[in-house]
Image (cartoon, rainbow, N blue to C red):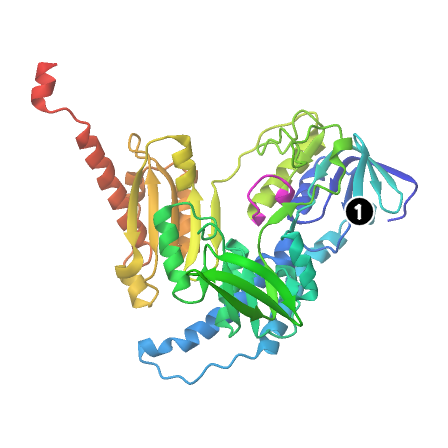
Amino acid sequence: MNRTGQLQADVVIIGAGSAGMSAYKAARRFTDSILVIEGAAYGTTCARVGCMPSKLLIAAADAAHHARHVGRFGIATGPVRIDGQAVMARVRAERDRFVGFVVEDVENWPEAHRLRGNARFVAPGALLLDDGTRVLGKRIVIATGSRAVWPQSWNALGDRLIVNDDVFDWQDLPQSVAVFGNGVIGLELAQALHRLGVRIKLFGRGGKVGPLTDPAIIDAARAAYSGEYRFASDAEVMSVVREGDCVAVTERINGREVCERFDYLLAATGRRPNLDRLDLDKAGIALDARGTPIGWDRFTARIADSNLFLAGDAAPDAPLLHEASDAGRIAGENAARFPFVAPRHRRAALGVVFADPQLAMVGASHAQLLKGGDAFVTGTVDFTGQGRARVGGRNIGRLNIYADPETGRFLGAEMIGPAAEHLAHLLAWAVEAERTVQQMLDSPFYHPVIEEGVRTALRAARDAMSAQSLAHTPCLDCRTAA
């Protein structure tokens, strides 16, 4: 759009990612006085470097993996050959297709609503772009996303240090990659690269496996993944240095220092919200020691009692597309209707990791239940002997469900296993509907399906509740004496 020295709007949105786009669409239902500021390329994290390209790489990896293992079904096969250039060409082409849809969507917005540039606060309600344009917003939505972070010392690795963004621009697959970080990104990419013939090792810390918090599920996941590829969930790394065109990683293993060299180090060691470049201290809001706004409400997206709203990965919320879209919608609507601000429904917690077997978490996690101090029972199923899982050769994993022993209400679940992405949706809907274990058992279960494993876990939870109830029932003599 053509600029003057100063622009103003009822609603100013910083960032045109998933949350920003959702905020724009919601706000536009109530006002046409909107400006969206974006300093980088259009295209959400999900489409450009997150959900979609990673699933494209995983799809290729899974195809190779299944081709190597058809022998167990009595099907003869020859060696599987990976054409790295062809794999990455499809990843890039399909990625660009998804990004194209997002870019087209944004570019169809009125030009007067779009601003290119990086913004920072210079006063409450006032922003300055890097070209000197001043932007005044009666209400401002911050949807600036997040970025990868890593130890500063790794910068010495130069172009041997990469993040997930870089992977999806590869022209070919490398020979070897050291993957650091046992979170979602590390788990997914390490396994995918391994299955595509890349020599990898996944270096983790603290023994964790993705977002899991239930010790039994963590143990099952660790066993499943380390049984396929080299996964040190609590690696004792002594040094990481560049040697020529390689990265040398020295690790202490069983008291010995072992050095291994890789083509790249893939940093999947976490992400931080893009708030530090906004000069939020000048926005008239209180910040904590990390520079994060104090008083953010995830049900209104509002920051304390200000006219600022925060949504997406920039907020202290789950970094998931559906959560970002929900939060953006809430932020955009409340910003447009301000000073009327209404809390909105947030969906039941649902998270999936697309490793194989998949991980999933639904509703309240094991750690959250322990922290809350509320009583709960656990029902479990081991997929090793589950009928449909065994038929398909996918009989690995475990599901734990949690229920309130007093009300029988289903509270949440953690799992690793076959079709976890689908089981998780089934369970998330049950959390959303506040169903009890018995109501869930009264629902239909076909045979033979993976979902029968859910029924097994529900039955175990019901039995645990019954046993606990009997244990607290006084005997007849005791009641008579009373």
The amino acid on which the numbered mark 1 sits, given as a three-letter code, is: Asn
What percent of the width, then of the height, locates residue 32? 77, 38
| Residue, far top | 482
Instruction: Residue 398 in the image: state x and y as whole percent.
Output: 33, 54
Q: Which residues are magenta?
A: 312-321
Is residue 318 in the magenta section? yes
Classify 55 as above or below 479: below
Q: Locate residue 53 relative to residue 425 in the image: left or right.
A: right
Q: Is residue 204 magenta?
A: no
Q: Work out whether residue 447 or residue 473 is closer to the camera in this orientation and state it.
A: 473
Instruction: State which quadrant residue 224 falls in.
Output: bottom left
> In the rendered image of this protein, does residue 176 appear above or below residue 144?
below
Disc 1, SS = loop
In this view of the protein, can residue 290 be seen by the observer? yes
The residue that mark 1 highlights is 118
* Residue at the image position 65 percent from the left and 60 percent from the top: 165
Q: Position of residue 286 (x, y in %)?
A: 69, 28
Which class describes the residues within 10 Å of circle 1: few (<14), some (14-19), or many (20+)?
Answer: some
Position in image of residue 15 (x %, y %) = 72, 46
Secondary structure of the magenta portion, mostly? loop
Whether residue 448 is visible, yes or no, is no
**Residue 221 placement: quadrant:** bottom left
Q: In the orientation shown, which residue stands out farthest toward the right? A: 5
Instruction: Identify the residue at horizontal 68%, vertical 37% (top origin).
Output: 332
Which part of the image, by quadrant, shows the C terminus?
top left
Instruction: Tell me which residue sits at (42%, 85%) in the image.
Output: 78
Number of residue marks: 1
Would residue 23 be found to the left or right of residue 193 on screen?
right
**Residue at horizontal 63%, vertical 52%?**
151
Question: Foreground: 269 or 57?
Answer: 269
